[in-house]
Image (cartoon, rainbow, N blue to C red):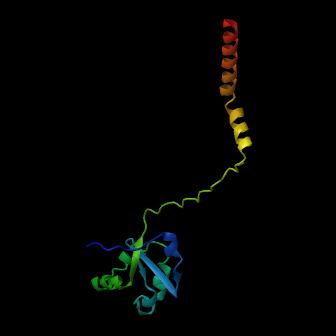
Amino acid sequence: MPTLTKLYSMEEAALHNTPDDCWVIVDGKIYDVTKYLEDHPGGADVLLEATGKDATEEFDDAGHSKSAKDLMQDYFIGELDLDPTPDIPEMEVFRKEQDTGFASKLMDNVVQYWAIPAAVIGISAVVAILYARRK
């Protein structure tokens, strides 16, 4: 069954670059080697120089043994997020101030839809004239 691992950005991993908090990236995997600094055969400086970047090449060039690679699993904390999603800016919401008065709403509609009342008045006038001529 697959296990879920935490994803870290390169920027986040690069922040952990001190003797009190040291992360190393090898083959896209992130290791917290803080507790291993004093035990590392090459010295703490070697690991500290490998922080803040992908140290896969340096790790491979050093010719680590299989037991060293197995030991790394004890310090595994997550993987490098190779496809970080961009920050999505927060949406701003604007609310139009509305007048709740009935008269102002009616006037807004009349001004907006002036053709309808004008047509009603015009048709009424024509009907009235035609009705008056018949009598």
Which quadrant of the rendered structure holds the N terminus? bottom left
Front-lying residue, 89 or 133 = 133
Is residue 122 shown left or right of residue 18?
Answer: right
Point out residue 129 in the picture as x, y percentages from the top left corner: 70, 11
Residue at the extreme top of the image, as rendered: 134
Tell me residue 55's x, y (percent): 43, 74
Q: Nearer the viewer, residue 101 or 48?
A: 101
Residue 11 drawn above or below residue 63: above
State the residue lying farthest toward the left.
1
Classify the position of the C terminus by image quarter: top right
Quadrant in the picture for residue 27 = bottom left
Q: Nearer the viewer, residue 84 or 126?
A: 126
Residue 108 position within the rendered picture, expressed as x and y whole percent measured from the top left: 71, 38
Q: Residue furthest front?
A: 135
User: Quadrant location of residue 6?
Assistant: bottom left
- Please give left or right for residue 35 compared with residue 117 in the image: left
Instruction: State whether residue 57 appears in this view.
Output: no
Question: Which residue corresponds to the image point at 35% horizontal and 85% vertical from the top-left?
Answer: 74
- The x and y percentages for residue 85 are 48, 61
Q: Is residue 102 above or below residue 64?
A: above
In this figure, what is the number of numbered marks?
0
Q: Quadrant of residue 134?
A: top right
Regarding residue 115, the answer to whether it shows in the image is yes
**What residue is rendered at 44% in x and 78% in y?**
24
